[in-house]
């Protein structure tokens, strides 16, 4: 009985909470909402949309939102791709500055021909674009021209984890050492799916040599858990230092769940005090409900992320002050796929992250010569620059050619023709 | 004092409201969030992102969201555009079915040459793409091939409102008559801005003849109000019938406020019992905080909208059960610009709107021969079809060519080169 009464009181309270305080019930000024958008939330009653301007968004215009940006793309110089899709470079890591240069690591495929699917693949012909790969790396002195320095981490001899392929690396610089986290395939990808553990190698220099560490860094979830099968796209970031000068390492990862064909992709988080763990999964995983090759970066006191595709919240920039409880900070478009960013504060435990202005991403060439390229992107997701050109949404609307490339399938056209005929009968 | 005590109590209540009930404080099942995404909101504690799956989104996957869609584009047959940008067709109206055909109205420019800006324009050479225009119309028997039927509403002789240009029409079919609402320019657009009143013409048939009505349909806001200057893109829709079989007409319109260069575009709403008014503005206008050429359509008991660009909530589909209090229903991409949809329930006062599967939109050709085309789009924002191909987000990722077309300006490249040089010093 007591509980029922409490419930009834709670109901009333919920209602009064949902309502604005008395002073907010007054109507807008005579004539309507003001011509000059108030910087502070007005105290008069507003529509749901205008309330969101102040409650949900960083600012009343994207131009004033540090986490809103458009993206500009530039081809790289210095990396060659051979013929007929033989060579792929994809899934670039975060970019690291060392020895007066920028370093990037990536999935490097150099096979006699392009990928052909699991049915036709063999020991030398790859099943997928990330099959039979090594971790390659390149350096640059301007961020636009890159020189491949060769293989950083080769796939090890059978039966070591990763003997079939190592792919999708990310890098961590921590207390004088470098760590590469990557997916280690011990069977051809594309057969059952892409299940593989995350492996790690370390080095004293970004030029190597790299030393593989035994064991699995992030264990799969228990049977029945969202991350029981895949742990992909490992991505370390160093959180702000605590009073003792110590930082937690946040290792984000992607898993695919809910089963085919209704896959959902989300991001989980595992936390450790040192690069080799042990990593403890955050109890409220997943920390994101969307995104595919999501890229995190330090921003202000927390962590921001680019969610390029998949899910309800694809095409957003998100932010979590604690690196765990992410909120949508901006909706944008034509985001980089599989971004690897130059985040100057990724590893320094800075109290305030400055954000990012550039990175590399990949783009896929389809057809007979299918493979992936690395290209560069620039943006303004940084407190250090203010580039109005990058804050103006849809500065260059999609052309007719770009739209017509997204055409109807023959089946759709047939359905549509029949519907029109029936409609006009 | 009493008020202070109340405030203090209120604070506590706000906190308890924000918290989940006791039962929701339990942790996820052993091992973590389940592999199969629960259809109903779980009672265990979840991250902010996973709470949004249930609290903010229509479904846990866009594929299950009736208001999520990708867009496919098809060129139209039958409309010619002459040479050097002489002819423009843009800002298509809603599409109406009558006499066994589909009808569409649009801004039609047919001038000796393309538009040149207000400084160089004269009595026959247009300042903007919508200067020196008439309202044209076309019909189709399949939605893909269109035949222009000529001018529906010409610009009237000077000094009648619209003598310089009539543009951006939308149509209403109501109680056996047809109404065209459009922008009526009595001075060259692009001079001060685009300030002009909304005019209306009516006809007994979609083929005309059209009779211009004297007077302004939607007055500008009072001095200092958000809509004091521009009333654009008039867009009527008929709300569900009440008990007496009567419907309200919702006339949505766009205004630009906050002053250049910090323009904000929002949508306002004016309501009337009959097509010629009087229209009463909704007291909590604006009802949307974003969007440029926003397109409304009847959906379920309310109104949904495509917000193609501009503002914090560009690239979203929104929904309001009452046609006033819009919420974000989906984030999507490559939306049609200035859509005019075929909404079978736009004017029938149906209790449940079925939504839309197609429409026309415009796309702009830049350069020396600059002008606008009408093209067709298809989508699944309808309860009547279920096309998984249109629910799969980013089915066709952007190509390298499309990305490289969004390149850096020379000034950006200079800034970026200097930053890299300084960074690597």
Image: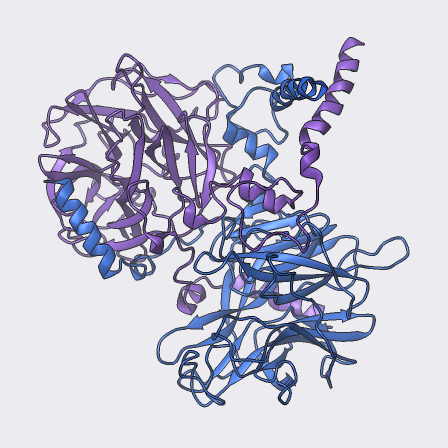
Chain colours: A blue, B purple
Vertical placement of residue B424 versus B69, above or below: below
Quadrant in which residue B92 is drawn: top left
Vertical placement of residue B296 versus A281, above or below: above
How many numbered callouts? 0
Q: Horizontally, is B145 left or right of B390 in the view?
A: left
Which quarter of the rendering shows the C terminus of chain B?
bottom right
Quadrant in which residue B301 is drawn: top left
Q: Nearer the viewer, residue A12 or B201?
A: A12
* Observer able to see residue A69: yes
Q: Nearer the viewer, residue B176 or A310?
A: A310
Q: Nearer the viewer, residue A409 or B342?
A: A409
Looking at this view, name the residue that lies furthest to the front: A1
Please give the name of the residue rendered at 50% of the width and 25% of the height, measured from the top-left corner. Answer: A47
Residue B19 is situated, as x and y percent measured from the top left of the image, at: 69, 33
Quadrant in which residue B247 is drawn: top left
Residue B103 is situated, as x and y percent measured from the top left of the image, at: 16, 38
Residue B384 is situated, as x and y percent measured from the top left of the image, at: 28, 41
* Observer able to see residue B408: no
Q: Horizontally, is A364 left or right of A63 in the view?
A: left
Which quarter of the rendering shows the N terminus of chain B?
top right
Vertical placement of residue B249 versus A278, above or below: above
Q: Horizontally, is B271 left or right of A67 in the view?
A: left
């Amino acid at each position: 009985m007591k509980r029922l009464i409490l419930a009834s009181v709670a109901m009333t309270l919920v209602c009064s909470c949902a309502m604005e305080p008395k002073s907010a019930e007054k109507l807008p000024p005579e004539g309507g909402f003001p011509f000059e958008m108030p910087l502070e939330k007005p105290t008069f009653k507003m529509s749901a949309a205008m309330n969101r301007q102040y409650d949900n968004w960083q600012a009343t215009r994207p131009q004033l939102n540090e986490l809103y940006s458009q993206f500009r793309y530039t081809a790289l110089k210095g990396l060659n791709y051979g013929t007929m899709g033989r060579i792929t470079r994809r899934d670039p890591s975060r970019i690291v500055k060392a020895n007066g240069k920028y370093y990037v690591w990536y999935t490097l495929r150099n096979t006699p021909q392009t990928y052909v699917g699991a049915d036709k693949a063999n020991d030398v012909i790859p099943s997928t674009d990330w099959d039979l790969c090594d971790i390659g790396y390149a350096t640059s002195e301007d961020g636009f021209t890159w020189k491949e320095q060769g293989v950083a981490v080769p796939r090890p001899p059978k039966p070591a984890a990763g003997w079939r392929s190592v792919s999708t690396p990310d890098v961590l610089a921590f207390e004088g050492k470098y760590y590469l986290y990557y997916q280690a395939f011990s069977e051809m990808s594309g057969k059952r799916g892409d299940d593989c553990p995350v492996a790690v190698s370390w080095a004293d220099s970004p030029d190597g040599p790299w030393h593989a560490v035994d064991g699995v860094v992030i264990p799969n979830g228990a049977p029945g858990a969202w991350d029981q099968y895949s742990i992909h796209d490992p991505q370390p970031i160093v959180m702000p230092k605590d009073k003792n000068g110590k930082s937690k390492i946040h290792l984000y990862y992607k898993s695919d769940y809910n089963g085919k064909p209704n896959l959902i992709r989300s991001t989980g988080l595992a936390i450790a005090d040192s690069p080799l763990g042990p990593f403890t999964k955050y109890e409220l995983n997943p920390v994101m409900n969307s995104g595919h090759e999501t890229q995190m970066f330090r921003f202000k006191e927390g962590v921001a992320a680019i969610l390029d595709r998949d899910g309800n919240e694809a095409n957003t920039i998100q932010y979590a002050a604690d690196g765990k409880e992410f909120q949508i900070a901006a909706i944008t478009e034509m985001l980089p796929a599989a971004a690897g960013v130059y985040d100057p504060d990724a590893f320094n435990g800075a109290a305030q992250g400055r954000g990012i202005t550039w990175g590399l991403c990949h783009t896929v060439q389809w057809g007979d010569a299918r493979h992936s390229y690395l290209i560069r992107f620039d943006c303004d997701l940084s407190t250090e620059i203010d580039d109005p050109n990058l804050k103006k949404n849809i500065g260059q609307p999609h052309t007719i050619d770009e739209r017509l490339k997204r055409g109807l399938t023959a089946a759709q056209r047939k359905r549509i023709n029949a519907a029109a005929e029936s409609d006009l009968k």
